[in-house]
Image: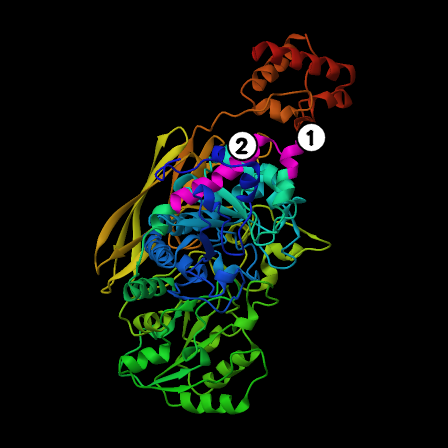
Amino acid sequence: MSSNTYPSVNDLTLEERASLTSGGDAWHLQGVESKGIPGYMITDGPHGLRKSLASSTGETDLNDSVPATCFPPAAGLSSSWNPELIHRVGEAMGEECIQEKVAVILGPGVNIKRNPLGGRCFEYWSEDPYLAGHEAVGIVAGVQSKGVGTSLKHFAANNQETDRLRISANISQRALREIYFPAFEHIVKTAQPWTIMCSYNRINGVHSAQNHWLLTDVLRDEWGFEGIVMSDWGADHDRVASLNAGLNLEMPPSYTDDQIVYAARDGRIQPEQLDRMAQGMIDLVNKTRAAMSVENYRFDVDAHDEVAHQAAVESMVLLKNDDAILPVAKDAKIAVIGEFARTPRYQGGGSSHITPTKMTSFLDTLAARGVDAAFAPGFTLDLEPADRTLEAEAVETAKNADVVLMFLGLPEAAESEGFDRETLDIPAKQVELLEAVAAENKNIVVVLSNGSVVSVAPWAANAKGILESWLLGQAGGQALADVIFGKVSPSGKLAQTIPMDINDDPSMVNWPGEEGHVDYGEGVFVGYRYYDTYNKAVDYPFGYGLSYATFELTDIKAEKTGANTARVTATVTNTSDVDAAETVQVYVAPGKAAVARPKHELKGFKKLFLKAGESVEVSFDLDERAFAYWSEKFNDWHVEAGEYAIEVGTSSRDIAGAAMVALDGDGKAEPLTEWSTFGEWSCDPVGSKAVAAVYAAGESGELPKLPDNDMMRMFLRSMPINSMPMLMSEGGKKITAFMLDEYAKLAK
């Protein structure tokens, strides 16, 4: 074998093939150096590189890693609604992997924020699968454009931390297909992540790592996935079953490669399956060889910090701005209250914890920019009781200020990988401090730091302005100053609804499960799909976000471009004297449907930067999938014929206008049987002809006449036709036989 020829599975012994399906240690692939297959490193993401300093020994230390750019976690970056910016973040992450000789970075995580209490919501993208997929794809495409792999995770239905290692997520096929799969599906089909990480949990009783339907039937055969599947760390409980299901790589190693060898020898693993899984590992190594062969590469620390800065700017969502309290004049007398201003919470806890290359707090930025402000910490960043001395100092500091900037939020102890939150509330001592300051000064802007939504309604009356800054990464201090002082206008939009109360969330009925399982009883009605459909009051709706500018959406039009496709156009105008960005959102609202469907669903968005007074026309092409639902009857996507509204707006509840399109439908029809209802026969293209023949035969006397009063027709419509004798005795039996015979003739 020449040095320029990469090995294949055919060059390996059985033992060597088996060895490729397990890691070398916690952070390395298992190479076969004698055959030219290196054991490259893989490390955590997903919002930056977390290469553990102990990784060379195979150990794990979540807080000891090489310096890397800490970009805003998905909690913030998802609010940018800017796929191009997210792609730039991915490119920067890929460059840092090249420097550190990391072949695969573990992320992004695109699990759905089913419930805002989920402990890992900070590193997931949205309650909406369309938004999650169309944003996070930028990380995958950006990283892989540099020759480094990503690991799309956690496949699938990892939506809580409680009992996450073993809980069974019991979910309908329709909810899986419409809510929990589409982000993965879109990224697989458009960007082909080099790896996918399966989740810990079971799905309908089967561990993800051993789920052949999940890893092979759906992922590979339906979606065309070409990469490898690895386990989450410790998620593989049966090497043989997992490999047969389609798991290429166990991580970390359990040092049980002999199990694979024995199973291959005794026929429990077919040679072809082992070869497929092992060849996938060789292919992964070969994809990364070029990037891993670059020597002495150094990424531009300052340039990457600037990408993190821009990402942080676009992550913030302005929720409230009464009396135009923002932006703040630089010559205003400013009081800054809250320890978060000095000690920012810029990332989440757990396996994604990064050591940043730089770190700038809001107070640091004020000092660097020559902005004078009085500061008082007000509280400690823990869950301990209030410190009355700190409170009194804060109230005194705020008394005579023109504007009080209060930095509130969740300390790291309140949310992290490994546990779910118990409340939506921020710590009581912070709310009490806000109330005390508001008693002395009404000009308050609250700046929030949190990885998932927090309750706002209980304290919002005490703030004229509310800026949701999420977790902003290492450049958050500069970004906050840019927005607060008006250097740029906030442009973020909520990627998850802020409810009035956690008990308004439909998943709470089953959260977080019991006796080893959790029922996803809300089905497809997750987040705004529930709140908007059932007209539930929310604090701030999905897609919401204010600006220092004002915008108008006009000339909303839709045209049919195919049997079940359409294009919608609108004109967006910046009606203010402030240059700023607006995100146009497109929702599809089905008409009458055979199944319960949400009021509307996001199916398109575009972020546009417009100068003051500028107008631009924007268009969206909606494919057949945009109008479809998953039919369990057909076990496929289904578009019903009929009218659909295409809504254009700036949030799920701020709809500027809608245009109607009438679609042909996909023509799918289930064969009629004696168990089909009379109503189903009447609606079916062929069955309706048989029904017409029954009525004609009744008029001619060939058959008994069908009931002609409203009550009897109502009963008849809902009956399977084999129950007609219940209404019409022997005559009903004759009608059933006639219909089945007529249908057989017509269907030929």
Whether 13 is among the magenta residues is no
Numbered label attached to residue 408: none
The amino acid on which the numbered mark 2 sits, given as a three-letter code, is: Asp
User: Where residue 291 sits in the image (x, y, percent)?
Assistant: 34, 50
Q: Residue at x 72, y 21 (%)?
A: 722
Give the residue pinned by disc 1. 711
Give the residue pinned by disc 2. 636
Specify whether residue 84 is in view.
yes
Residue 161 versus residue 179 in the image, above or below: below
Residue 270 versus residue 86 in the image, above or below: above
Q: Secondary structure at mark 2?
A: strand
Residue 120 vs residue 606, the one in the foreground: 120
Q: Quadrant of the N terminus?
A: top left
- Mark nearer the N terminus (2 vs 1): 2
Instruction: Estimate how packed mark 2 is, as few (under 14), some (14 to 19) or many (20 or more) residues with alpha carbons within 10 Å.
Output: some
User: Where residue 112 sits in the image (x, y, percent)?
Assistant: 52, 52
